[in-house]
Amino acid sequence: MPASNDTAPGADVWAIRPCIYGGKRRERGERFRLAGLPTDARLFEELYVQRLLPKHKLYPCDRCGKALVVGENFAAHLTDAHGLGRDEARREADSR
């Protein structure tokens, strides 16, 4: 069966919940591109990823280069991956 636009290689998606994709751990809210793996459709079916839409606001991380969707996910990323305190992470997310 041919790939839909959602699961086509190169489609921009974001992780609704943490998952492993292409041997890399993707955190909740992380934006990435599909590589055309056999498991792409399953990630959509099991609600691990969602297509990135124009209405989704991206929060690029200046520290590691990841882009995250939703300010809450960005603040959690700053706290978990970069060790910022919750208040400091929230202020940085709110300032964007």
Image (cartoon, rainbow, N blue to C red):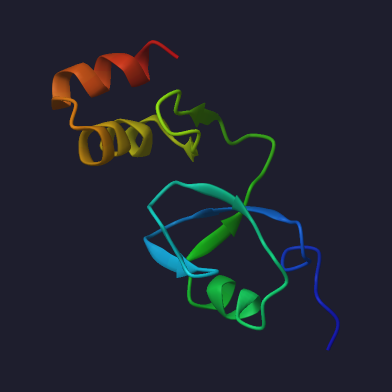
Q: Quadrant of the N terminus?
A: bottom right
Q: Is residue 56 above or below residue 43?
A: above
Q: Is residue 19 left or right of residue 4?
A: left
Image-quadrant location for residue 6: bottom right
Q: Extreme bottom residue here? A: 1
Q: Is residue 50 left or right of residue 33?
A: left
Q: Is residue 57 above or below residue 90?
A: below
Location of residue 15 in the rendering, given as x and y in whole percent from the top left corner: 48, 56
Location of residue 91 in the rendering, given as x and y in whole percent from the top left corner: 27, 14
Residue found 15% across the figure and 27% down from its top:
86
Location of residue 52 in the rendering, given as x and y in whole percent from the top left corner: 64, 47
Query: 32 or 65, which lies in front?
Result: 65
Q: Is residue 26 left or right of residue 49?
A: left
Residue found 72% across the figure and 68% down from its top:
7
Q: Quadrant of the C terminus?
A: top left
Location of residue 29 in the rendering, given as x and y in whole percent from the top left corner: 43, 46
Residue found 29% across the figure and 31% down from its top:
78
Query: 65 or 47, which lies in front?
Result: 65
Image-quadrant location for residue 51: bottom right
Query: 48 or 34, which lies in front?
Result: 34
Q: Is residue 87 left or right of residue 40?
A: left
Q: Is residue 50 above or below residue 21?
A: above
